Image (cartoon, rainbow, N blue to C red):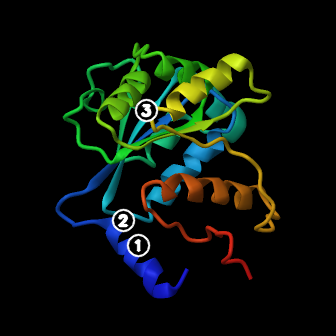
Amino acid sequence: MPEAQHKLRRSLALGPTNNPKRLIVAMTGASGALLGVELLKEMKNFPRWETHLVISKGAEHTLALECNLTRNDVSSLATQTYNAADIGAGPASGTFRAEGMVVIPCSMKTTAGIANGFADNLILRAADVTIKQRRPLVLVAREAPLSPIHLQNMLSLARLGVTILPPVLTFYHGPSTIDDMVKLILGKVLDVFNLEIPGFKRWGELE
């Protein structure tokens, strides 16, 4: 991407200083907790954006297992953190200003709940609101292999305009570390919100 175009996209993403943009970020118990952690870190590159984080109980266990991190460790990376059981928190309302939502990683249980409108916790309710307000919703769906039930739920959501973005491995950008692979996934996620992150390699821009 030409440097001038990169600066323009970054400027648009930052937005006005007196009107911060909000991204709702939810982490569930699926494997891939590192993806959520690194997304929050990347969002620090956009100081005029806020991250509003919801962590499920399952995510707390996965964070400890895969990243040796606690809920408090991850909460410190976000602008504000909510209890997943707090169905009355701000993100549960359509009047809560947000540019959209990312569920990263997204378990098949959460996918099923969103697909069927079973909004019995803040993650599901916030996703339900995101859909009804016609805002971008990205699900970094993590499961393998996928059953017909999983596929049907994801198809139902895709037909509603939800972006289903599994963390699929790619090799065209020449990854040499796990960080390289994570960077590509995060680049694709944040591209939905017109956010350009350093180090994200696009097809056609490779040396």
Which quadrant would residue 88 be assigned to in this image?
top left
Percent from the top left, x then y, of residue 35? 62, 46
Identify the secondary structure beneath mark 2. helix
Q: Amino acid at mark 2?
A: Ala
Residue displayed at 64% across by 69% down:
202
- Look at mark 1 in the image and give the residue it sits on: 9
Left-right relation of 38 to 192: right
Mark closer to the chain start, 2 or 3: 2
Identify the secondary structure beneath mark 1. helix
Is residue 60 in view from this perspective? no
Left-right relation of 101 to 108: left
Spatial CA distance of label 3 from label 1 is 28 Å
Is residue 92 in view from this perspective? yes
2 or 31, which is in the foreground?
2
Q: Amino acid at mark 1?
A: Arg
- Look at mark 3 in the image and give the residue it sits on: 54
Percent from the top left, x then y, of residue 134? 33, 38
86 or 64, which is in the foreground?
86
Percent from the top left, x then y, of residue 148? 72, 19
- Look at mark 2 in the image and give the residue it sits on: 13
